[in-house]
């Protein structure tokens, strides 16, 4: 099929405001910009940030988290980038409509006759109609077609069904039909047919490379009301070598249609006055960013909208904070997780204030028995986090493949993410409040296990070989192996999460992990959270008080898998199985709900945690 640029029909006609149908937290995980959504009467694609409105004019709720903001501003090279919660619909029925806009997509539909029309060969035959044809003619009930074309970088568009059926020709204007044999929905049983007798099996749309009849990607971004941004002569979407990216067939309702790229940070305790000053500067940063001295700050303070700043802070205090923020000094220049790990490792028996009006952070460290035995000998610290705040931000999204990242949340690997807006000036964010437990492993035990055990070195060699095979398959040149210590911590976290969920009162899918690794200093945070301002109910904290019991249960779960010995004997460098990021790991032992895992259920190997039936000798907990 000859490649050609799709004809743009202008901005999508129908705008749907899904008021009251999507929670704020769902926007960042399932229904963000570019997501394909089926509403009761429409199929739509969620609009970009420009279609949500102006955060300043419409009074969006701003979200403050300085460490995360500093990291994102550096990544996006935008010193004025801010975070806002997704807009909510007004409570008053007579208030102007506000919320997230969605555009009608796709623009091709299938007619639903009262009874299936018999086609050639006994197929069930239905008309395939474009939106413009439906508007001009008189047809019965129609439903959106479930097949579209997209590329891994997030671009998406309608399939040129006329060109597909005619092998590239577009001069025939007769009616199109979708013929289906049977009820399985298999692509081999679906034919696209024209009234002129030309037809083609939909299975041809799955051909890869130059053979694909879907052609190259033109970079369509319909969620930005931009059908085809290319120049009309060559595709706008190219890979790192400058070659056009080929389109793939995508089922709108498939689980690989939308993968959000999110990054998060835990709010750590700071001085209350200092925190209030930072938030005040952040809210007024648009006016104070260009200040050159105390006089400029004092001049801005005279404005009526900054009366609350005049009442709390002096011009010298504000100017000092402006200079600090502008220079980028302080904790925010470190990795997102670094300050959190420092806090958990140095936290006293009580940190934060357990009062109703100060709910961002309250935690204390448990006093461990010096004579503890068994697996607990390798645990150097346990922290009960009674109250914590997590800020989650969406940066972009992909299709077909999830955007992998490194363990410090600093890199996107493998594929480019699609933009949330034509020009990103702010990013959507949500706040979750909850609780958790943190445990740190003894640095000396970690160093001895990693550096002095030849079995660990041998297993690491296999894991690295699998990782290199994965990099080659994903074309993730910037990816780096996080180390055998991370794989062990990650596997232990999954085992412990499964064991804890049986008694803590929370479903396993509602508990999430956060792995910390800085040289020999390392730890695991298991936590749960909710957008509700009151947080959660304390089940994880109570579990932390009996950690020895749950740790023994977790290690017992790792010894034997229902798929052993096949699971225990799997090698990550096995090219036949293509599970390059798994050692002894499968759905029967280590894999958990993907929203709970920070690495998409990859980089797992229980043989590094506890001895399995294979007995590789690489287990960290040898006394379990």
Image: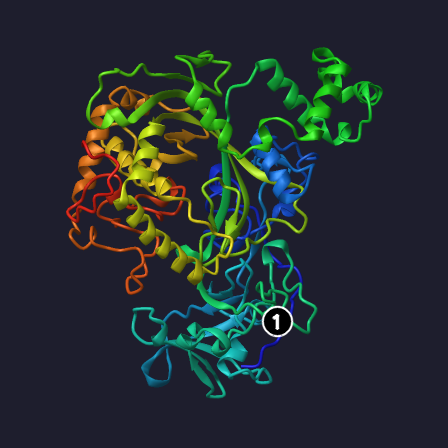
Q: Foreground: 168 or 19?
A: 168
* Residue 252 x %, y %: 45, 60
Q: Which residue is mark 1?
A: 6
Picture quarter containing residue 130? bottom right
What residue is at 33 percent from the left and 33 percent from the top?
A: 446
Find numbered disc 1 in the image and state the secondary structure of the residue it sits on.
Answer: loop
Q: Foreground: 167 or 262?
A: 262
Specify the quadrant that holds the C terminus: top left
Please determine whether, in this image, residue 401 is positioned above or below residue 603. Answer: below
Q: Is residue 345 left or right of residue 429?
A: left
Please determine whether, in this image, residue 259 is positioned above or below residue 576. Answer: above
What residue is at 19 percent from the left and 26 percent from the top?
A: 374
Picture quarter containing residue 118? bottom left
* Residue 497 x %, y %: 29, 35
Q: Foreground: 109 or 623?
A: 623
| Mark 1 closeness class: few <14, some 14–19, many ≥20 residues within 10 Å | some
Q: Is residue 205 left or right of residue 454?
A: right
Q: Foreground: 373 or 303?
A: 373
What residue is at 68 percent from the left and 71 percent from the top?
A: 232
């Amino acid at each position: 099929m000859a490649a050609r640029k799709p004809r743009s029909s202008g901005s999508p006609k129908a705008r749907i405001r899904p008021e009251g149908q999507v929670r704020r937290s769902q926007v960042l995980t399932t229904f963000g910009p570019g997501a394909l959504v089926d509403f009761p009467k429409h199929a739509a694609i969620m609009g970009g940030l420009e279609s949500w409105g102006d955060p300043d004019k419409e009074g969006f709720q701003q979200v403050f988290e300085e460490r995360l903001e500093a990291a994102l501003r550096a990544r996006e090279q935008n010193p004025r980038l801010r975070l806002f919660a997704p807009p909510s619909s007004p409570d008053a029925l007579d208030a102007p409509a506000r919320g997230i806009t969605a555009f009608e997509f796709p623009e091709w539909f299938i007619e639903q006759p009262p009874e299936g029309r018999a086609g050639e060969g006994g197929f069930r035959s239905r008309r395939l109609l474009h939106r413009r044809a439906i508007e001009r003619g008189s047809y019965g009930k129609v439903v959106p077609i479930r097949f579209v074309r997209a590329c891994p970088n997030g671009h998406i568009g309608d399939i040129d069904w006329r060109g597909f059926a005619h092998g590239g020709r577009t001069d025939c204007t007769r009616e199109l039909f979708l013929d289906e044999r049977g009820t399985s929905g298999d692509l081999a049983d679906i034919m696209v047919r024209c009234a002129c007798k030309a037809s083609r099996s939909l299975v041809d749309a799955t051909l890869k490379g130059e053979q694909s009849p879907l052609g190259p990607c033109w970079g369509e971004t319909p969620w930005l009301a931009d059908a085809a941004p290319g120049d009309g002569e060559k595709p706008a979407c190219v890979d790192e070598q400058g070659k056009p990216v080929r389109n793939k067939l995508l089922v709108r309702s498939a689980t690989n249609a939308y993968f959000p790229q999110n990054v998060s940070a835990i709010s750590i305790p700071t001085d209350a006055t200092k925190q209030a000053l930072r938030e005040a500067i952040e809210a007024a940063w648009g006016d104070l960013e260009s200040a050159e001295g105390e006089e400029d700050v004092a001049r801005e303070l005279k404005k009526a909208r900054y009366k609350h700043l005049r009442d709390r802070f002096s011009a010298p205090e504000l100017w000092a904070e402006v200079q600090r923020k502008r220079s980028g000094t302080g904790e925010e220049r470190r990795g997102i997780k670094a300050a959190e790990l420092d806090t958990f490792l140095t936290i006293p028996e009580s940190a934060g204030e357990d009062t109703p009006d100060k709910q961002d952070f309250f935690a204390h460290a448990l006093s461990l028995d010096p004579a503890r035995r068994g697996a607990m000998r390798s645990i150097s610290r346990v922290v009960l986090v009674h109250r914590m705040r997590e800020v989650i931000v969406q940066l972009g999204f992909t299709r077909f493949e999830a955007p992998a990242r490194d363990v410090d949340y600093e890199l996107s690997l493998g594929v480019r993410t699609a933009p949330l807006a034509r020009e990103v000036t702010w990013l959507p964010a949500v706040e979750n409040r909850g609780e958790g437990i943190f445990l740190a492993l003894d640095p000396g035990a970690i160093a001895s296990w990693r550096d002095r055990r030849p079995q660990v070195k041998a297993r690491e060699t296999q894991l690295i070989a699998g990782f290199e095979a994965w990099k080659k398959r994903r074309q993730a040149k910037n990816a780096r192996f996080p180390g055998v210590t991370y794989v062990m911590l990650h596997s232990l976290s999954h085992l412990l999460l499964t064991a804890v969920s049986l008694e803590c009162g929370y479903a396993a899918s509602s508990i999430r992990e956060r792995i910390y690794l800085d040289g020999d200093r390392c730890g695991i945070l298991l936590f749960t959270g909710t957008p509700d301002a009151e947080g959660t109910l304390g089940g994880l904290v109570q579990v932390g008080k009996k950690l020895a019991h749950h740790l023994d249960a977790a290690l017992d779960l790792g010894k034997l898998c229902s798929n052993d010995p096949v699971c225990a004997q799997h090698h990550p460098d096995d090219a036949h199985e293509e599970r390059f990021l798994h050692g002894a790991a499968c759905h029967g032992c280590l894999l958990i709900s993907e929203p709970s895992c920070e690495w998409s259920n990859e980089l797992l190997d229980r043989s590094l945690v506890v001895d399995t039936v294979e007995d590789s000798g690489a287990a960290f907990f040898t006394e379990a």
